[in-house]
Amino acid sequence: MASFSMEDFAGNGALKELLPKLVEEGWDDVPTLKLMNLEDMDAVSMTQQQKDALGIRSYLHDRALLQYGDRLEASGRSLPELLNLSTGDLSSQFRMKRGHKARFLDRTSPCADPLPKSYEVSAQGGSRADAPSRTNSLYQSPSSANFRKMSVTRLSMKSSTSTNDRFLEKSLSDLRIKDGHIFKGIVAAGPAEPRACGCMSAPPVTNQIAPYSAIENISVQKLTPEHKIAMEPLVKTRTPPMKASELWRDKPAVFVCIRRPGCIMCRAEAYQLYLKKPIFDALGVQLFAVLHEHIESEVKNFWPRYWGGVVLYDRGMEFFKALGGGKLLKDKFMSGFLLNPTAIANYKRAKATGVKQNLKGEGEIKGGLFIVGSGKSGIAYQFIERNFGDWAPLAEVVEICSKLQNQYQI
């Protein structure tokens, strides 16, 4: 799994000396940097060598092969030339391992799946389980025309480059819930499938959205800044605790509540969500990761490798209690994982992305995700991790964020 650190991405090659200028021009995180087109590169006076380096490193980053960046770049070849090399050349010239060679030469898809297929919702009225009915028009599925109008309006403000606008608009369209899908509510959770061959039932989850009062006065502490180049690995002087409502006072925000930062499934979820940061930037939505325990070594291992933005510490576990309807939602390792086919499938999905893991920290408290509107408009969406490793469906998250943006533009 590749890192989100700008320094790690650039390595020791041609991009290293250009990093300060890139940051100054707003290309200050890896997901955004990878959106650059030729016009953007010319605007910062990139040499051909630097353009080739960006192409190579973007390709490697998608396939979790960034460890070979310096060697491949030093060869002086462009990406198309490297892709035409034989497996023998990749081994002898760059010491590339057998499995890595197969991944490098596979041009069909990156190593990580951007949207878990197990959570796709059909266009024939399929919907997330345990979701209460809701009639507010904000939560009704928008038409294709309205969605495209929103995308064009917002993206034209975000970037003056038409190519980037088209790229982001297409990304939004690809993630849009299919026409015909109707949200039955804004509280979502993974399926309640029986465990241990039907001998055990999944723990119940709340079907009511958390009240705004449950999260408004939560005390949180920033453990990391929003990642920029040349920042210390962690803030040397801890920021004082603050009210969570300050974070969404001016802009909507997504809060992904991490069960355990060393967990392979939690890391994969954070990585997948942060990969889409340019889309959330275009929608004017902030991203935050929330931890319920503070182990400094685990924070360092988690940020910025799997999450490049702000990491918050929720000492009182109030975000996690809000997900459980006022109490912590917990599950045992035996019943919640070993005897749960859904959790095992989630683990295999995360392992396929190449994420590393450890067993440090408390791992029984379930997490989830909140989308909170700006000001005091309240919680717009809530996803609960019923099974270990359940991810909030990315299409639904983007859909809700786009509706919030439409609401503020009216």
Image (cartoon, rainbow, N blue to C red):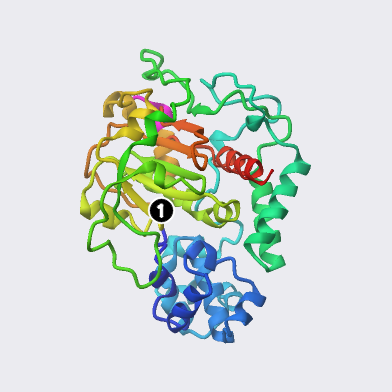
Residue 272 in sight in this render: no
Q: Which residue corresponds to the image point at 59% horizontal and 38% vertical from the top-left?
A: 400
The quarter of the displayed image where residue 396 is located: top right
Which secondary structure dominates the residues rendered in magenta? helix
Q: Is residue 128 visible?
A: yes
Q: Residue at x 35, y 59 (%)?
A: 225
Residue at 69%, 51% in the rendered image: 151
Q: Is residue 256 above or below residue 50?
A: above
Decide: few, some or many residues near mark 1? Use Cα within 10 Å; few <14, some 14-19, many ≥20.
some
Q: Position of residue 226 (x, y in %)?
A: 40, 59
Q: Amino acid at mark 1?
A: Gly
Image location (x, y in percent) of residue 35:
59, 66
- Left or right of 290 on screen, residue 119: right
Q: Is residue 75 above or below residue 197?
A: below
Q: How many marks?
A: 1
In the depicted view, which residue is nearer to us: 33 or 111? 33
Circle 1 residue: 354
Between 161 and 108, the residue placed more toward the observer is 161
- Label 1 residue SS: loop
Q: Position of residue 359 (x, y in %)?
A: 24, 43
Residue sitting farthest toward the top = 199
> Which residue is the extreme one toward the right?
145
Tell me the quarter of the picture where residue 197 sits. Answer: top left
Please indicate whether residue 323 sits to the left or right of residue 121 in the image. Answer: left
Q: Residue 194's x, y, as percent?
A: 42, 18
Is 294 placed above or below 41 here? above
Magenta residues?
A: 339-343
Which of the two residues, 366 or 311, is positioned nearer the viewer here? 311
